[in-house]
Structure formats: structure tokens, C-alpha cells
Amino acid sequence: MAHIPTSQERRALGRARRKQVPRQDHGRWDAKLRQHDPIMLVEESMRGRVPQLVTLKYERMLQSPFGFFRGAVPVMAADLALLPHTSIVNQICGDAHVRNLGAFAAPDGRLLFDINDFDETIRGPFEWDLKRLATSLVLAARETCAPSEKVKDGRNAVAKFVARYQKLIGTLSRMPVIEMARYQVHRLQRISTVSNALLKAERSTPLHTLDTLTVVTKKGRIFKEEPPLLRRLTPQQARPVLASVKAYRESLQPERQHFLSQYTPLDVAFKVVGTGSVGLRDYLIYLEGNGARDPLFLQIKEEPGSGYAPYLPGSATSAGHQGWRVVEGQRAMQFQSDPFLGWTTIANRDYLVRQLNDHKGSIEIDDLAGQGLIDYAEICGELLARGHARSGDACLIAGYVGNGEKFGVALGKFAEAYADQTGADWKELKKRR
């Protein structure tokens, strides 16, 4: 019988990886390493998107360095692939940044706060998530903090983020597996930015979405017309979207298929979402269950391949159905996921399906200033550690990162250098546009 490494052996293996990639080496970034034009990578990522909406995506990316960062995952993926990595692989969010955490309703109705955007998820080196989230903390500090505090607050936020990650990944690595899987972060309500998101989520009910996105006409309730952000589809355009629900239903668990069967679709619309996703096809279906006060909104969101896939060809999730990739990554990392999370196909394109705005609440960048940024950074560290422990080997990671300051100092240096690089890339995009 093959030997199964013990937790102590896996922790030791993680420590041994420091010889291959010393922790201080994670502080490296040098644009001279680049073998690609970052703006060309952005342009290539626009292929296949709705042409009329590409301009809108560029407009959102040009608003600020942080806006560019949100829409330029392919650029950072290419840059990270140039650097040495630990080869400690688990499911990564892929687009871990300060605005990709939020509140949403669990299957039992409780409000949760967790990582909630997995469009770029894939199996890859765990530290890539940390480097992206650390960079976003520095960019957030530069955008929201007082001029005299930007550098200090950015550094402090990254240090707190990494320290919390190290502490919790170490704790989870020593827990029984089932206890680790059940672990919850209990102090969320005490963090003002998180409690604000939870309050927004409490108000974001299906009935609120009904009032926000639809109007009553002589023919009944239908989606509003708010072009280019929201527009109704004609019956002919809606037909393939509605037909895709059959394949989507089969991706759900049997009891959830039963719940879905009790809803009737009434209208279909096209909606523009996010920054990275602008230009991709995104459909909404408005359904009604037990009367007009029982709406259900399904979002059918196009999913191209992860921006990391070209650099991780051995990943099982780099190929196959891209909606399935996102669903599996989300279920692996989240404590609980949307009960209507599934996937489908329309006209040979892969789609993720989920509820739209079911008690969802997001973090606003303006809330991340001063102590608010520091407190939020700690929560980011804990939630990312939990996601990595759920989807990978916490013992390996804990052995590598340790509990000292060396790893955090290195990530802080990288985050500042890469935030500078993002600012330079943003300026270059402005020149070319």
C-alpha cells in the first residue's frame, strides 16, 4: 500500500519548498522580464466580445489604475507566469481583489460574506491569489487614503492581510478535516466595511430587484429598457436563451431541479455587468413562482477561458466547459454557494448560471480608507486562507509561509512594485486610446 504523507510530512515538504523559491524572492518584479505587450494582451482579451460594448469596457478601465487592474487579469497572469512560483497548487480565485468579496444569501437564508467572483478560477500556485489581492490593497490605498497616508496605509494593509492569512492557514492546517471544512469567520459584523455590505445585502431582496429591473405594462411585468446597460430581447432572440435552461437544470442537484420547475419564465433581457466582464454575453431571465410576489432572476453569464489557462496547461480546469470550471472552483473555495449555481451552453458558448442579486451586497472602494482598509485587509486574509485550505493542502501552504514577517515583507514589496506597474500600464492605455 502506497505511503500517505502525514500532516507533519506535508508541512515539512512545504518548508522544503523555500529552498526552491525563497520567500523573499516573492518581492521581485521587473518590467524587463516581460516578453509581451500588456496593451496587446488587453486587446486580445476583447476578441469574441460584443463589439458595441468593447468601448464601454475601455472606458471603465481608463477611469483609474484600479479600474485598469480589474479589467486586466490576462496582463497580470502573463506577468506572474514569468516569476518563480512555489508549485504548491490548489484552486485559486484568479481575480482576488478587494471588490471581489461580498455578501450573499446562503441556501438556508443566512447572509454570508466571502469571495464571490470566480470567473478566472483555476488550479494554480496559491501565492498568485495573494499577490493579486495584495496589489489591490495598495491600489485601493492610493485611490482612497489621504495623500500623506497612502504609502503607510498600503503597506500596513498588506502586512495585516498576509499576517492574518498566515495565522489562519496555520490554524486550519492543524484542525480535523471536517472541522476545517465547517470553519466560519465569526467577527465579520465588527468590520464596518463588511457590516455595510451585509446591510445592503439584507435590503437586496428579489422583490427589490423586481422593482429595480422591471416595469408593469398592459402585457404584464417586463424588463426595463436602459440601453446599453439593460435591454429586452425579442422573442426570437430570447428563444435560445430559454432553451438553454433545460441543460442548466440538469447541472443542478435533484431537489433544486424540483424547485426550479415551479417557476415560469416571463421575460428575457441582456445586461452589462462588471469591468472585466463587459462585452461578454450576459442574459437575465425573469421567472415567477407562487404569484407576482415570488420572482426569481437567473443570470446566464458567458465564461471564456481563465486568463491563467495559457500558463497552466496541466490544469484540469483549463479545458472543458468554462461554466463548469467556474462552478467547480466556486464550490471548492466558498463556505456555501448559491443553490441555483449551474452551467449551460448557448450557440457553442459556455455560460455560468446563478441567481441575480439574491441578497447580494458589495464593498465600495470609497469605504476602504484608513483603518477601514486595514480592518478589511485582515478579513481578506482570513477568507482567502479558508478558501485555499478548503481547496488545497493547508499543511503544505502553512509549512511554506510560516508565521514570521519575511513572507509578508516580500509580498508588500511586490504589491507596491506591481501597483506602480499597473499605473504605468494604465497611462500607456490612455496614450493609445
Image: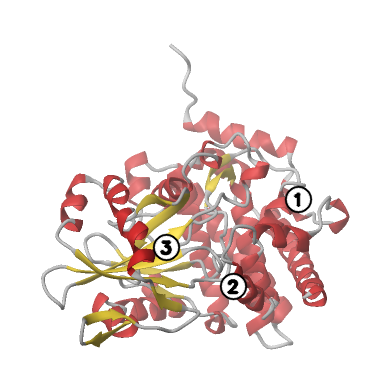
Label pair 2/1, CB-CB below 8 angstroms: no
- Label 2: few (<14), some (14–19) or many (≥20) C-alpha neighbours in 10 Å: few
Q: Secondary structure at mark 1?
A: helix
Residue at horizontal 52 percent and vertical 36 percent from the top: 316
Would you say 252 lies left or right of 42 here? left
Q: Nearer the viewer, residue 356 or 399?
A: 356
Residue at horizontal 47 percent and vertical 27 percent from the top: 6
- Label 3: few (<14), some (14–19) or many (≥20) C-alpha neighbours in 10 Å: many
Mark number for residue 49? none
The quarter of the image holding the C terminus is bottom right
x, y percent for residue 111: 30, 69
x, y percent for residue 314: 60, 34
In this rendering, the answer to whether 293 lies above or below 263 is below
Which residue in the structure is indicated by mark 1?
A: 24
Would you say 36 lies left or right of 141 here? right
Mark number for residue 114? 3
Amino acid tagged 2: Gln
Residue at horizontal 58 percent and vertical 59 percent from the top: 163
**Residue 176 in sight in this render:** no
Q: Earlier in the sequence, mark 3 or mark 1?
A: 1
Mark number for residue 52? 2
Amino acid tagged 1: Gln
- Label 1: few (<14), some (14–19) or many (≥20) C-alpha neighbours in 10 Å: some
Label pair 2/3, CB-CB below 8 angstroms: no
| Residue closest to the far front | 236
In this rendering, the answer to whether 239 lies above or below 256 is below
Label pair 3/1, CB-CB below 8 angstroms: no
Q: Nearer the viewer, residue 67 or 4?
A: 67
Q: Nearer the viewer, residue 400 or 289?
A: 289
x, y percent for residue 258: 16, 52
How far separated are the C-alphas under marks 2 and 1? 45 Å
